[in-house]
Image (cartoon, rainbow, N blue to C red):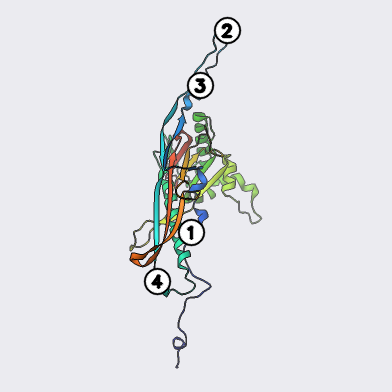
């Protein structure tokens, strides 16, 4: 029958819906873990006090007309940060701008695109700087059976003891430093496992919903571990190069990290790590970030560019305990 549906209608973009897989910014938690230190210069030094001098018992009884006992401490001024400038851009060619239809908003989309790239880079930099073996004084490896020294039974095993494992690490860090760790960071796959672990289910079974399902989440985990907060690395990234089939994976992997983080940074304030953000970089924001839009006349395009100037530094290896491959 003529005319057909295709003869009387030409497909045009809908103006009330479009599909883009833009990760929720709340999935990126690197800035929520260690304090961010705003710095005026790209590089500088910071002092580190040796805890050994501050934890000895050296006071003695003073006899009449004698000197009191005395001691001192050392300060290491050799530690430095260097805020590298990370950058990425998206070009908007003039023909593309002239030919675009609603609901395309090229400037907004380019800004979201480069911002997401910056969040992924910061999250992956956190992972490589802190969420890895060989960084902290205490490393544990998850094993499928018969754990030995510095090993734990992988937490996906119903016979494993994740609550005891974390408490043992807490006690060791407290004994070693005098500071009780207060923050636990979990890769999403580890979080998913702990939510369903029988040890946690048993701890909260009397708080079940009317349907009989025990409610476990990060707040309940924090209560069980007696720490301030449990954070989950939910962010993902594509490991494949452009032009290849996408290969998605969690940035956090199958890992966990227990650390001490101070309520606020300050002088003589220890922390497992700090993030130095170069806020003095020509109007950069609190994360050392700048977004610029400028003309690229030689290629007849507008460019939207983001920069982020930062350095992630482990400050005290003794204030961290790390579990690698803690679930199968």
**x%, y% of residue 27?**
50, 54
Name the front one of labels 2 and 1: 2
**What label does residue 96 carry, if any?**
4
Q: CA distance from mark 4 to mark 3?
A: 69 Å
Where on the picture, by quarter, is residue 110?
Answer: bottom left
Task: Say few, some or many: other residues with alpha carbon within 10 Å of mark 2 (under 14 / 14 to 19 / 20 or more).
Answer: few
Mark 1 lies on residue? 23
Q: Earlier in the sequence, mark 4 or mark 1?
A: 1
Mark 2 lies on residue? 63
Q: Earlier in the sequence, mark 4 or mark 3?
A: 3
Q: Earlier in the sequence, mark 1 or mark 3?
A: 1
| Residue closer to the observer: 153 or 248 | 248
Visible in this render: residue 301?
Answer: yes
Q: CA distance from mark 1 to mark 3?
A: 49 Å
Left or right: residue 231 versus residue 97 is: right
Which type of secondary structure does the marked residue at label 1 adopt?
Answer: loop
Q: CA distance from mark 2 to mark 3?
A: 21 Å
Q: Residue at x 34, y 61 (%)?
A: 242
**x%, y% of residue 222?**
57, 43
**What label does residue 56 carry, if any?**
3
Residue at the far right in the pictured view: 210
| Residue closer to the observer: 166 or 277 | 277
| Residue closer to the observer: 296 or 325 | 296
Task: Say few, some or many: other residues with alpha carbon within 10 Å of mark 1 (under 14 / 14 to 19 / 20 or more).
Answer: some
Q: Is mark 1 in CB contact (under 8 Å) with mark 3?
A: no
């Amino acid at each position: 029958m003529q005319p057909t549906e295709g003869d009387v209608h030409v497909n045009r973009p809908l103006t009330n819906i479009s599909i883009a897989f833009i990760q929720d910014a709340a999935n990126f938690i690197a800035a929520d873990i260690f304090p961010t230190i705003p710095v005026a210069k790209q590089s500088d030094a910071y002092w580190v006090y040796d805890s050994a001098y501050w934890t000895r018992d050296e006071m003695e009884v003073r006899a009449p007309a004698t000197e009191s006992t005395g001691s001192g401490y050392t300060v290491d001024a050799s530690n430095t940060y260097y805020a590298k400038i990370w950058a990425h851009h998206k070009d908007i060619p003039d023909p593309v701008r002239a030919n675009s239809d609603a609901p395309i908003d090229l400037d907004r989309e380019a800004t979201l695109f480069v911002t997401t790239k910056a969040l992924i880079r910061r999250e992956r930099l956190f992972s490589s700087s802190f969420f890895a073996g060989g960084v902290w004084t205490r490393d544990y490896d998850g094993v499928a059976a018969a754990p030995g020294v510095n090993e734990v039974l992988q937490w996906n095993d119903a016979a494993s003891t994740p609550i005891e494992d974390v408490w043992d690490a807490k006690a060791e860090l407290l004994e070693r430093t005098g500071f009780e760790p207060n923050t636990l960071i979990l890769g999403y796959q580890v979080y998913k496992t702990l939510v369903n672990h029988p040890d946690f289910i048993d701890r909260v079974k009397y708080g079940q919903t009317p349907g009989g399902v025990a409610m476990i989440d990060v707040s309940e985990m924090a209560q069980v571990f007696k720490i301030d907060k449990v954070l989950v690395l939910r962010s993902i990234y594509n490991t494949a190069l452009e032009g290849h089939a996408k290969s998605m994976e969690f940035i956090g992997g199958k890992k966990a990290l227990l650390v001490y983080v101070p309520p606020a940074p300050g002088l003589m304030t220890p922390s497992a790590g700090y993030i130095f953000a170069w806020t003095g970089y020509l109007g950069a924001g609190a994360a050392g970030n700048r977004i610029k839009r400028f003309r690229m006349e030689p290629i007849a395009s507008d460019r939207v560019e983001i920069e982020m100037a930062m350095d992630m530094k482990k400050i005290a290896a003794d204030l961290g305990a790390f579990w690698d491959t803690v679930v199968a």
